[in-house]
Amino acid sequence: MITPRVLPLQMPFVDDKGAMHPTWQKVFTQQIIPALARNLGTATLSAGSVVVPNKSIQPNSHIQLTMQTPGGTPGFLSVSHVVSGVSFTINSTSKTDQSVVAYNIIQP
């Protein structure tokens, strides 16, 4: 019979007191957090659409939309007119939609 051996979980970015290692702290603050900030945001619709400037957008990017604060007459949300490295457009099926929309850009 084979007895499974349980190995302790190794977390190299955290020390034995639970504090983040200085190297990982630097990676998080200088690389990971800014990368997330480039891909997350909110935009307010005006007359049912808004152009969102974003340097990280690509034609194959996946964009998740979530209505945060309804305004006007909310409709169904979609993305159109992606300009690589420049912007994308969020549209609503309602021309009177003035909602605040959150977006999350996921790079494949």
Image (cartoon, grey):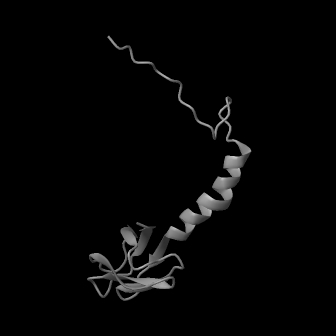
How many numbered dots are placed on residues in this image?
0
Taking the view exactly as shown, the residue that stands out farthest to the front is 1
Horizontally, residue 94 falls left or right of residue 21, namely left
Q: Position of residue 104 (x, y in %)?
A: 44, 67
Q: Quadrant of residue 51?
A: bottom left
Q: Quadrant of residue 5?
A: top left
Q: Position of residue 49 (x, y in %)?
A: 37, 85
Front-most of residues 74 and 9: 9
Taking the view exactly as shown, the residue that stands out farthest to the right is 22
Q: Quadrant of the C terminus?
A: bottom left
In this rendering, the answer to whether 101 lies above or below 27 is below
Which residue is at 62% across, 38% downward? 12
Which residue is at 55% across, 70% downward? 38
Front-most of residues 73 and 30: 30
Front-most of residues 4 and 97: 4
Q: Position of residue 92 (x, y in %)?
A: 31, 81
Horizontally, residue 28 falls left or right of residue 51, namely right
Q: In this view of the protein, can residue 15 be seen by the observer?
A: yes
Front-most of residues 47 and 61: 61
Q: Quadrant of residue 61?
A: bottom left
Q: Quadrant of the N terminus?
A: top left
Taking the view exactly as shown, the residue that stands out farthest to the top is 1
Q: In this view of the protein, can residue 69 be seen by the observer?
A: no
Q: Position of residue 21 (x, y in %)?
A: 70, 42
